[in-house]
Amino acid sequence: MHRIGRALLIAFTYIGTIVGAGFATGQEILQFFTLYGSQATFTILLASALFIWLGTKTMLIAREIGAVSYEDMNIHLFGTAAGRMVSAAMLILLVAVSSVMMAGAGALFREHLGLPFESGLLVTAVLAFAVIAAGMKGIKAVNSLVVPVMLLFVAVVFVFTLHLPTSGQFLLAPGDAPAWRVWLSPLTYAAFNLVLAQAVLVPLGASAPDAATIKLGGLIGGACIAFMLLAGHIALSAQMPGIAQFDIPMGRIVSGLGLRVQALFLLAVYAEIFTTLIADVYGVTLQLRQRTGWKETVIAPVILLICSAVGQFGFKTLLSALYPLLGMISLIWLAKIAAKRRLPSG
């Protein structure tokens, strides 16, 4: 029972790190999967298999080499010189993605709560600092609370979709994209999520008590991600093609489900923004602590302040400029981690 409990903490932390604002709004699922029609079911299964396999492998390798931060992992994968270059690029990307999350929090406060954009940045930064200051225990505690909210929201939308006459449309929806693009999409999706997730997966794996707990946690986490992807895809497919015109397609789906479900949606979106933010900032904080020797309580506020400033450029602008580039860069990391042999003692 103790092992199952520890594995669930790993699974929830994994899910919370992978699932971000783009997932909650439905835009990621739409762009990477649903737009490709009936083939999306199979590409979702491929992406989910990669999450289970490579997410677990990342944590196992981190435990085997005693990694402190994702820089240790990158040096292990690429060698010292190249690994440090990759880590420097990752630091920039993690700060940029964290800025996207901050911008998303500000937009949510302004557009849905009627509060100033800056209030969303301030509240989120203060809460994030409190969690990061508590270390990995804080990260695990937050994810153990918010991931069930995410799963509940997805389950509610899925059950609603099953009652629609178009619920089976995901099996028949046409797709006219070339095959290479259809099958590259799940690789790109898994790659950019995993390369950023290692900011937490590495210290998470390094602190795990044993390999069996990591394997169970990776399996549960990957399976839950698979369910969320499939449920979101089925819900979006039932509303195609009209749903594709909306910036927040999932928001359009829940708009007719009553105030309670809409409130749950806003809570899920904010929770997913927050869990991704704390994961990325925590990873950057560990790397900078390793390089500078400064305390997390000094580094984290500086990073959060930078993210708040960059977040002023806006959620949509940052998202559209950053994610496609990040996905292509991440494919190199995906190939490296897939090909890397684990240590004989693992």
Image: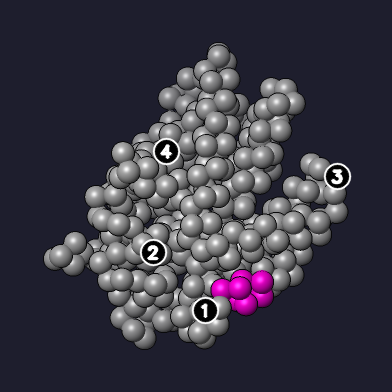
Q: Is residue 260 left or right of residue 197?
A: right
Q: Which element is circle 1 on?
A: helix
Counting residues from the start of the chain, the first of labels 4 and 1 encountered is 4
Viewer-side label of 4, 2: 2
Q: Is residue 149 magenta?
A: no
Quick one: which residue is furthest to the front in this view?
A: 2
Give the spatial CA distance, label 3 vs label 2: 38 Å
Question: Which residue was labeled with disc 2?
Answer: 202
Counting residues from the start of the chain, the first of labels 4 and 2 encountered is 2
Question: Which residue was labeled with disc 4?
Answer: 224
Q: Are marks 3 and 2 in contact (CB under 8 Å)?
A: no
Q: Amino acid at mark 3?
A: Gly
Question: Which residue was labeled with disc 1?
Answer: 288
Q: Which element is circle 4 on?
A: helix
Q: Amino acid at mark 1?
A: Leu
What range of the chain is rendered magenta?
Answer: 296-302
Give the spatial CA distance, label 3 vs label 1: 36 Å
Q: Is residue 24 left or right of residue 119?
A: left
